Every structure is written in C-alpha cells, then in structure tokens.
Image: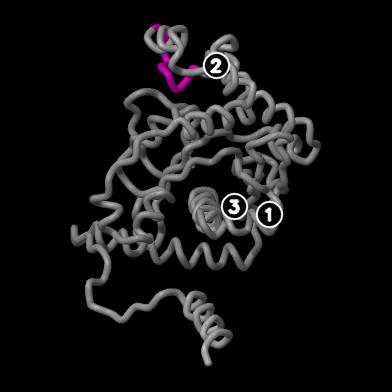
Amino acid sequence: MKILDYTSGMQIDPPCLILNMPDAVYHSISFGISKSGLDKIALSPAHYRFGEKTERSRAMVIGAAIHCALLQPDLYESEYMRLHGVTVRTASEYKAACKEYSLGPDYILTGPESDHIAGMQACVLADPNAKRLLTGDGYREASLFVRDPVTQVVVRVRFDFVPTDLTLPIVDLKKTRDCRPEKFMRHIHEYRYHVQAALYLDAWNWATGEHRMWCNLAVEETLPHAMKPYLMGPESLILGRKLYRENLNAFAECDRTNTWPCYDTTPELIEVPDWVLGEQEITTGETGE
C-alpha cells in the first residue's frame, strides 16, 4: 500500500492511504463508494443514485472541528479562527470574518462553539484510557482507497486514527447524547456503526494484510462530556460484514448494468404495528362486555 501526502489534483491509484486530504475534498470524490453511500444503497439503489444531495449542516461543521481538536490539536490551533467575543453567527463581526478568512466559514467558530469544543477536548484528553487510545503514533484523518477483492469496486474510507502499534485498535470518535451501553448499542444499530467497523477493518486488511480491532470512542456532547470506549464485538462485526457485502454487491451490479431500482412496487398487505394491535386487544378485553 502506498502512503502519500495529499496534493491538489493528485491522481488516486488504489490501494493508497492519503494523509492530510481535506475533509471537503474527500467528500467531493465521486468514484467508488463509501460507507455513507452503502447506507443509501441499503434503502434502495435509487436513493443512492437519485436522492437529494444533503447540504453540510452546522452540526457537521462542529463535528469536524471536534475531530480536529482531539486528533490534530496543532492543526486545530492553526486553522480554526475562534471568535471568543462573538456569541451568534448573525453578529457583524462573524459575517466580516467569513468574508475575510481564507479557509471560509467552516473554520470560524463563535465563542460558545469554541468553548464547547475546548471542554470536550479537555475532558477527553484528561481521561487516561482515551488519551492512550488517541495520542500515540499513527495516521490521523487518513483516507484509504482500495479495491474490494470480490467486486473490484473501489471502496473509500476515512479513518479517524490508525495507531502504528498493532496491539491497539483503530479508533473512531462518536459524539453522542448518551454513552451508556444500553443507549449506545441502539446508536450502533440505528447508524450502522457495526457496518462501518466491518467495512473499515476489511478495507484495511485488503490494503495491508493486517487484522485489526475496532474501537468506538463515544463522547457525550453535553457537560460533563462523559465518555466510554467500546470495542466492537465479533458477532456485531459478522453482521456488519454480511450487511456491507449485500450492499456492496448490489452497488456493483447496479453500476455494471446502470439500473438503479427503488422499492419493490408489488402490492402487499399491511397492518398497523403489532404493539398497537396488542394494545387495542387489551383495551377491548377490559371494557367490552
């Protein structure tokens, strides 16, 4: 696998790991498929091919800033403008900064936003387990391009942190509302974190031959920014691998034939959810005579 520093207009020849590729550049690349693309394929190929493009939200901007602060603190200090005296983005000072700052509004933070990020950064790096997972030698915000050996489709993944120490897991940061196990496992299912883990680990294996572990470092968005590292379990990885393989194979076939179907339109019987029917049966049993 080639390990390259990003340069504007560079040719991407898989397998390669590209360092320092801007987040916006990575997300603008159209060839191959990413995990977010496979999530859309899971809905239907038509959702992937013809679905509306989503604009980058402020939450996504703040998420990128949090990642930068935790994974690349020197870069965060040098690139992000923090307007400590400005509380809202409608302020004239903020608007003026957006016009003048060369990196653009995605790199300009209000006082409350920068305080929020600084709080998360301080809390996470004060924890010995989190610090051990995040601060060693390795590749941060690294973009991997590799061909799936089954379909020959180019898969693109962007790692938060790949330690060079093979005894340590690959780490993916997840900001969340609640990082307790019974809550976070629901997020794993809802957002298909197990699919991401399986795809990313396999992509790394295809490129390097290495077998790695996967860790989601869940960090709560609100004070006191509680956190919890979770190693992805083997059964979840098996299921994630099954799901991404179905989605990846479907993408490859749709791309080959240039057909992008939506849902099955055959009419079928439908009812209200079982729990509604059950509740109605209980109510009827109590009141009917």
Q: Verify CB contact (< 8 Å) between mark 2 and mark 1.
A: no
Asked if residue 58 lies in the magenta stretch, the reply is: no
* Residue farthest toward the bottom in the current orientation of the protein: 289
Residue 38 position within the rendered picture, expressed as x and y whole percent measured from the top left: 39, 55
Dot placed on the residue nearer the N-terminal end, 3 or 2: 2
Q: Which mark is residue 87?
A: 2
Q: Is residue 224 above or below residue 285?
A: above
Q: Residue at x 27, y 45 (%)?
A: 52
Discs 3/2, front? 2
Q: Quadrant of residue 244?
A: bottom left
Q: Nearer the viewer, mark 2 or mark 1?
A: 2
The span from disc 2 to disc 1 (Cα, nearest Å) is 38 Å
Residue type at tag 3: Glu
Q: Which residues are magenta?
A: 100-108
Q: Quadrant of residue 101?
A: top left
Residue receiving disc 3: 210
The numbered disc on residue 102 is none
- In the image, residue 252 lies at what x, y percent? 30, 60
Determine crowd level at label 3: few under 14, some 14-19, many 20+ residues with C-alpha closer than 10 A. Answer: few
Gap in angstroms between the C-alphas marked 3 and 1: 17 Å
Q: Earlier in the sequence, mark 2 or mark 1?
A: 2
Name which residue lies at 38% across and 78% down.
Answer: 271
Furthest residue to the left?
258
**Secondary structure state at the residue bearing disc 1:** strand
- Residue at the spot of label 1: 231
Cα–Cα span, label 3 and label 2: 47 Å
Mark 2 secondary-structure assignment: loop
